Amino acid sequence: MTLIFCGDIMDKLVEIGILFDFYGKLLSIKQYQVVELYYIYDLSLTEIGEEMNITRQGVYDTLKRSEQKLYHYEETLGLIEKFNKIESTLKNILNIANKLEDYGRENNIDSVYQSALKIKDMGKKIRD
């Protein structure tokens, strides 16, 4: 499964990073450590092997299984897709609130202006 990118090494780093943020804690401790050391700390397979006292091939196999699990979690749970939809909807709500705020200010309608500020405040709280 490809989330949003297509093949570039940098894209994969970002993609796995996002998957890891959402689903990393669902991996085994060993899988979590391998993904973290490889993608977050940018260690080589050999360096990770030395750090964890396993072979380079063992690190590679663990890394590939971990990546597959991360993709499987997104396919099954869809949290990243849901997050992106919520974020997009929230952005639209905040844009509308900005327009209402401007309209209330320009037309001297305090109730519209105040309501827009409340909507923006709630949107920012949701985002945080």
Image (tube, helix red, strand yellow):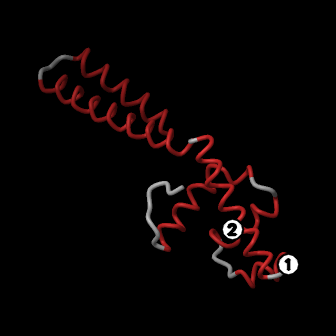
Q: In which quarter of the image is residue 107?
A: top left
Q: In which quarter of the image is residue 28?
A: bottom right
Q: Looking at the image, is mark 2 or mark 1 nearer the viewer?
A: 2
Residue at x 73%, y 51% (from the top left corner): 25
Which sits in the foreground, 6 or 96? 6
Residue type pointed to by label 2 = Lys
In the rendered image of this protein, does residue 90 appear above or below residue 110?
below
Please give the count of numbered marks on the rendered protein: 2
Could you tell me which secondary element the residue under label 1 belongs to?
loop
Residue 29 seen in the figure: yes
Residue at x 65%, y 62% (from the top left corner): 67
Per the image, the residue denoted by label 2 is 64
Residue at x 63%, y 76% (from the top left corner): 42
Per the image, the residue denoted by label 1 is 54
Which sits in the foreground, 10 or 60? 60
In the rendered image of this protein, does residue 126 appear above or below residue 16?
above
Which sits in the foreground, 70 or 52? 70
Which sits in the foreground, 77 or 35? 77
Q: Position of residue 86 (x, y in %)?
A: 45, 36
Could you tell me which secondary element the residue under label 2 belongs to?
helix
Assess disc 1: are there few (<14), some (14-19) or many (≥20) residues with their C-alpha within 10 Å of its C-alpha. few
Query: Between marks 2 and 1, how big is the CA–CA gap?
Result: 15 Å
Assess disc 2: are there few (<14), some (14-19) or many (≥20) residues with their C-alpha within 10 Å of its C-alpha. some
Q: Would you say 120 lies left or right of 57 here? A: left
In the rendered image of this protein, does residue 104 appear above or below residue 54?
above
In the rendered image of this protein, does residue 56 appear above or below residue 117?
below
Q: Position of residue 120 (x, y in %)?
A: 36, 30
Residue type pointed to by label 1 = Ile
Residue at x 37%, y 25% (from the top left corner): 119
